[in-house]
Each structure stands twice: as C-alpha cells, then as structure tokens.
Image (spheres, rainbow, N blue to C red):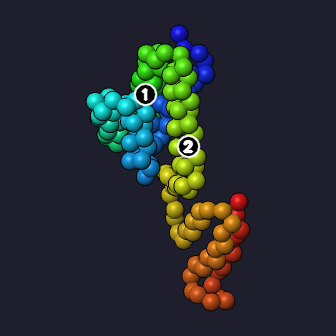
Amino acid sequence: MLAEAMIAAAAAAGTTVVQSASSDLWTAFRDRCARLVGRGDPARENDALERLDQTAAVLDAAGDDEAGRVRELQVGLWQGRFESLLESLEQPERERFAAELRALAEESTAKQAGRGVLSGNTFRGPTAVQVGDHNHQDVHFGPTGPTGPTRSVGPTG
C-alpha cells in the first residue's frame, strides 16, 4: 500500500496531465511526462506518449455538457497509472519517482500560472487585457487624444 504522500503525488500529477493537455505547454509537458513514466525504456515511453495523446484527444472531443465528467475521469485514470507505477517500484526508486511526480506537477502548475490565460470570457464592447507584472498600459477607447476616454492602468503585481 502506498503512503499518503505518494498517493497525493500521483493525484497531483494526474490533475496536471489533464490541465496541461489543453494548454500551449502540452508538447513539452507530454514529452517530459513520457520520459518520466518510461524510466529509460523506449517502449514504455512510446506507450506513455500514445496514452497522453489519447487523453488529449478525448479531452478535446468532449462536448461542453460532458467536459467536466471527462476531465475527472481522465484525472482518475492518470492517478491510477501513476499509483500502479509507484507500487511496482522498490522503495528507494519509489521515493525518487514520487518526488519527480511532485516536481513535474509543481513546475507545470507554476508555468501555467505565469501564462496569463484567459478562458471562458465574453467581452461586449471595448476591452483591454493586461498580462504580466509591473506593466504600464494606457488604454484609449473611441477618438484618440484628450477628448476620448482614457484609463491608465499600472503597475500591476
């Protein structure tokens, strides 16, 4: 039986697989995850790549009404795969692999958090979006110059 910390690492990595599948960081994440799962075995790495691609395709094909359920299912599948792999390893390697899973999840989450992703928004009328830290933005809607509405935003962070 796995320790609670290892189950948590598998759960975090499973969640990260699903979150990364719909991001522009997918290719780099996919390759790193497959190398991690492959553990130096090209056949296992290729199998992991196929499973990761299948996950991305299933998530992409899910309609709006089933997307949440499909995401939860895929998280559970990947958590189970990671847990099975952890259980198959001897203790010292199991601990290293759990640490690698945690690192994969933490690094991917940090990269995604820094991307400034906008999703599911509806804009009606003039819109300005600012992403980043310590930026300055002068927004002009309508006629340019001192007669048009202006809003100065910055710095953020």
Alpha-carbon neighbours of circle 2 within 10 Å: few (<14), some, or many (≥20)?
A: few
Kindly check if marks 2 and 1 are in contact, taking CB atoms under 8 A apart as contact.
Answer: no
Q: Please report the residue visible at 58 percent of the width from the left and 78 percent of the height from the top.
A: 141
x and y, in percent, of residue 68 in the image:
45, 34
| 109 vs 75: above or below | below
* Most foreground residue, 75 or 99: 99
Task: Name the residue tied to disc 2.
Answer: 107
x and y, in percent, of residue 21 in the image:
41, 42
Residue 48 visible in this rendered orientation of the protein: no
Is 140 displayed left or right of 97 in the figure? right
Q: Secondary structure at mark 2?
A: helix
Amino acid type, residue under disc 1 in the picture: Trp
Is 73 displayed left or right of 58 in the figure? right
Is 135 displayed left or right of 61 in the figure? right
**Residue 59's quadrant in the figure?**
top left
Alpha-carbon neighbours of circle 1 within 10 Å: few (<14), some, or many (≥20)?
A: many
Give how far apart the Cα atoms at labels 2 and 1 are. 18 Å
Task: Name the residue tied to disc 1.
Answer: 78
x and y, in percent, of residue 90 in the image:
49, 15
Q: Secondary structure at mark 1?
A: helix
* Most foreground residue, 100 or 3: 100
Foreground mark, 2 or 1, reads: 2
Q: Please report the residue visible at 61 percent of the width from the left and 76 percent of the height from the top.
A: 139
Q: Please report the residue visible at 61 percent of the width from the left and 62 percent of the height from the top.
A: 132
Amino acid type, residue under disc 2 in the picture: Glu
Residue 118 visible in this rendered orientation of the protein: yes
Mark 2 or 1, nearer chain start:
1
x and y, in percent, of residue 113 in the image:
58, 49
